[in-house]
Image (spheres, rainbow, N blue to C red):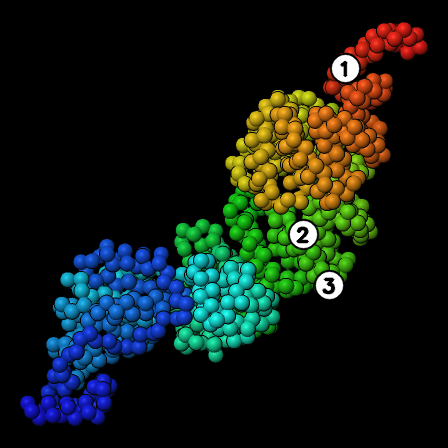
Amino acid sequence: MFASQFAFAAFVQRHGDGRFSLEEVYENPSDGKQSGTREQVVWPVRMGAVPNLASAFQHRLVLRKQIDQGVQANAAVVLTQVLAGGGGVGKSQLAAAYAHTAMVEGTDLVLWVDASRHEQVPASYARAALRVQAPGTTGRNSEQDARAFANWLASTDRSWLIVLDDITEPATLNRDRWWPPASADGHGRVLATTRRRDASLQGGGRALVPVDTYTTEESVAFLQERLISAQMPHLIDDSVDALGEVLGHLPLALGYAAAYMINEDEACSTYLARITSGKDRLGELLPGELDSEGYGHGVATALLLSLNAAQQAKPVGLAVPALHLAAYLAPTGHPEALWATPALTTYLSAFRKPHSVDTVADQATGVDAALARSVMRLLHRYALITVQSRGGPQAVRIHALTARAARETILEKDKPTVAMAAADALVELWPAEDHLNFPLVAVLRANADTIIGHADNLLWQSSGHRLIFLAGESHLRTGLHLTATTAFWERQTALAERCLGEEHPDTFTARANLADSYSRVGRTGQAIPIEESVLTDRERILGTNHPDTLTAREYLANSYQQAGRTDEAITLHERVVADRERILGTHHLDTLTGRSILAVSYQQAGRIDEAITLLEDALAHIERILGTHHPDTFIARANLAVSYQQAGRTDEAITLHERVVADRERILGTHHLDTLIARSILADGYRQAGRTDEAITLHENALADIERILGNDHPNTLIARANLADGYLQAGRIDDAIALEESVLSDIERILGNDHLDTLGARANLADGYLQAGRIDDAIALEESVLSDRERILGNDHLDTLSARANLAVSYYQAGRTDEAITLLELTLAGMRVPGAEHPNAAVIEEVLEGWRGERYLMWKAAGKDLRLSGLAC
């Protein structure tokens, strides 16, 4: 006994502090007795290299609360909690925080195990067995000692925490039964971290805890604390939020970014511009040499650490090409169905290396949808993507930095193929009609934007890829983010002209879409020259009767109409309708759409009866062809309602408007732009019907949403604001109305110019406000200007000209200028009484005129004038 003690004492002396290598104990056994197990254990015991907490460590209270609640709910037995997440999300730091807390609280045993290699787990257990003198430990057989340690954990009344960090082979851990056992009295606890998401990580008392990136607040707090602690608070500026967003709130990336900014004395905004430019690679912007926190590798390496292992796992040889394609998609997610598209399976078949396939048969048959889905799940298991089976259209996600790191590994020669495959797959998923599945289309649109942004000119090779036009036209149809849509078409038009030349048909289409986007944001002056050029080119190259030529003519007519060039618009629209009737037939959808657009031009020209006849016929046929719930049907119904409203058929107009609003809310959603515009138009109908309070409520709500979506300067925003002012005026809120109308007029003159029809309308509305406020001279000055401009632009007999003439007549009358008032009203009445198309308000005008004439008769009679000279005696 004394000999054994002496031998161990000598061994301890040789190793200084009493810490010894398990391998040395096994290589140098003593006399066959339990060497290394006789020393008195000094508690608490700390084993393994517990990482230090990072500078500005975020405690992530919400996530830790979730972890702690899991322990409390299972207090009777140890609950092994597996912290699972991608590279760099801070799993090990979270586990380290628990380990440090356990040490501070005096936990008897804290064991940190590097589990990245499977064999290190039992080796660590065996060393721990010697250290705690677990019964049955011999120091001769590592597996036997590891089992002894596991038995000790299950039976000891000592408190303990085991951390298995970075598990890479969970199935092997299960097979060899190296998970720490359950603690019957609740003294023990296990935390594990892993990039994997295998089913084998759950069950048997284990619970999977997903660890995601920082929240926005945590990202900002980290950057601020890190820069302040480095005594460089001047680097914090307004871009700190955006920087966290661009870095995907990834703790590892945020740490490296902060170190870079500190080293280079570079503010958040400067660094943000550098990282969003795309000119520098991740390794240059987030370099490994800035590893001040001891992560051990750069961000790109951390993100793709599992890729090689996934490439060797079954199905072998497909993980790399699959991740490359996913890297071209939106980080916000894409549909699982994309992995079953022929475009994706064909791409994977082509990029699967012949030496990587498992069998010759696999190589011959290629990759099918089932195998592609297996690859998707494989990438999920290795935390390279995230798949949520109930995630809807955004079920499959990839972290933005993982995607960027993956794209940087694609060979230049392969990039066109990868980009085209991703684009082809999205096209195959795109529904024929956007309105059939708006949530899906919104996700596809976001993914299209991502692909197009990364691909640059790769999708403009021999022609423009179909995805470009699907996405761009979908953006135009939604009416959302029109400024961004305009920028999109400016970029794509420039690429088309550079890659395909100015006379390629796809270049014409891109330019036409650019002009359409200009028109929609009120930049009609820029739209018209482009559309005139496109029409000339298409007539020259495609001929005057080609469908694309007719569409170009229609687009130009729309812009003429928006610019107030009504006669030119009507001439072009009538030609388009005649050509389509001749070429396509009277009931073709394009013909019916053309008739509806022509009817809107008739509305603007005051030809209300013709407009109603065209719209009623078009609506009946469009409902038959497209159904009652198609967006084009809603448009036709709304246009008819406007015509009814202009014709004084207010009740019919309101009924139709209410139906349009209800249908758009149900099909498009309550916040879709078309829904909001429909509500605004309905509110105007309520106002005309005298339902002022309802009108104002609708106008105010619609205006708030339209301003939020389109911004303060969009023409539709200005129209909505003007309509609200009309409501205020009718409700007697004169000051509110005038303030709003003056603001609208100022904005609309600045944006649309002095001669735009909407500008003239805004002047007329403000004049009406001045009139009701008793500011007669101000009202007359504006109304004379409006009448003069409308006569010059629209002609003497246009409905808006007649309206301006009547309004000015009323102002003259109120100012005591009765003779001038009567003369103007007589001209107005003559213009309303066109044979076969008398305006419904003509009778009202005549009644007013008779009253004014009677008053003048009485005044002249009282003054003793010769009534025969007045021309009124008859």
Left or right: residue 850 versus residue 117 is right
Choose between 200 and 432: the one closer to the eye: 200
Q: Is residue 337 visible?
A: no
**Labels 3 and 2: the sequence-earlier one:** 2
Query: How many C-alpha atoms fall within 10 Å of the one at disc 1: few (<14), some, or many (≥20)?
Result: some
Name the mark on residue 486.
2
Residue on which disc 1 sits: 848
Q: Quadrant of residue 802?
A: top right
Q: Going 68% across and 58% down the picture, which residue do you hit?
A: 491
- Return the x and y of residue 822 as percentages of the image width and height: 83, 18
- Return the x and y of residue 343 as percentages of the image width and height: 54, 60
Q: Secondary structure at mark 3?
A: helix
Q: Going 60% across and 72% down the picture, which residue do you hit?
A: 413
Left or right: residue 307 versus residue 95 is right
Q: Secondary structure at mark 1?
A: helix
- Return the x and y of residue 515 as percentages of the image width and height: 73, 49
Name the mark on residue 159.
none
Per the model, the C-alpha gap separating discs 2 and 1 is: 49 Å
Per the model, the C-alpha gap separating discs 3 and 2 is: 18 Å
